[in-house]
Image: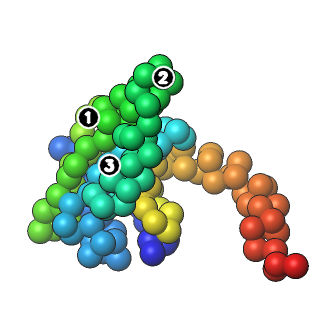
């Protein structure tokens, strides 16, 4: 389970050092993909394949399905961390997420996310209000 907030920096080549606590999870390879919030998600290759199974098997006779399949496939990149735990974030994905130098990497249980530091600050401030409301809903005892 991936948890926590980390603030590494992208180097001049667009490389990100994965948090030490995440490296074992991703050492065999990972997929960096776009999220709807203009951040990036990092999945193990296996988790990404499982997540995309319904997408890849959906009927591509529907335009919305084709659009989604194309956007997901075009906005994903398989990467293998080097010995220092670095991965390269492709330029297209850095542009999509507005990543320059200061980034925030968060654990989101089954995956990690990479955010522009300023965007993360805005998002987390806005999401804080709904967090307490959802906490009551999600963690309500049964019965």
Q: Which mark is residue 62?
A: 2
Check disc 1 and report the residue beneath it: 91
Distance between the Cα atoms at labels 2 and 1? 30 Å
Q: Position of residue 2 (x, y in %)?
A: 44, 71
Distance between the Cα atoms at labels 3 and 2? 26 Å
Left or right: 47 as drawn, with respect to 3: left
Q: Position of residue 124 (x, y in %)?
A: 63, 54
* Looking at the image, residue 83 lies above or below residue 125: below
Secondary structure beneath dot 2 equals loop
Q: Nearer the viewer, residue 38 or 73?
A: 73
Left or right: 86 as drawn, with respect to 38: left
Q: Which mark is residue 32?
A: 3
Q: Quadrant where the N terminus lies?
A: bottom left
Q: Quadrant where the C terminus lies?
A: bottom right
> Going 43% across and 22% down the picture, which residue do you hit?
61
Secondary structure beneath dot 3 equals strand
* Looking at the image, residue 76 lies above or below residue 136: above
* Looking at the image, residue 91 lies above or below residue 88: above
> Going 36% across and 44% down the picture, which residue do you hit?
33
> Going 19% across and 67% down the picture, which residue do you hit?
28
Distance between the Cα atoms at labels 3 and 1? 12 Å
């Amino acid at each position: 389970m991936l948890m926590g907030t980390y603030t590494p920096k992208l180097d001049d080549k667009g490389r990100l050092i994965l948090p030490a606590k995440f490296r074992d999870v991703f050492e065999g390879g990972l997929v960096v993909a776009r999220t709807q919030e203009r951040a990036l998600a990092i999945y193990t290759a296996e988790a990404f394949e499982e997540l995309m199974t319904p997408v890849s098997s959906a009927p591509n006779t529907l335009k919305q399905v084709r659009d989604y399949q194309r956007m997901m496939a075009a906005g994903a990149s398989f990467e293998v961390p080097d010995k220092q735990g670095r991965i390269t974030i492709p330029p297209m994905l850095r542009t999509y997420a507005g990543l320059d130098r200061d980034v925030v990497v968060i654990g989101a249980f089954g995956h990690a996310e990479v955010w522009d530091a300023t965007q993360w600050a805005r998002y987390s401030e806005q999401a804080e209000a709904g967090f307490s409301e959802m906490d009551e809903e999600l963690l309500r005892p049964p019965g």
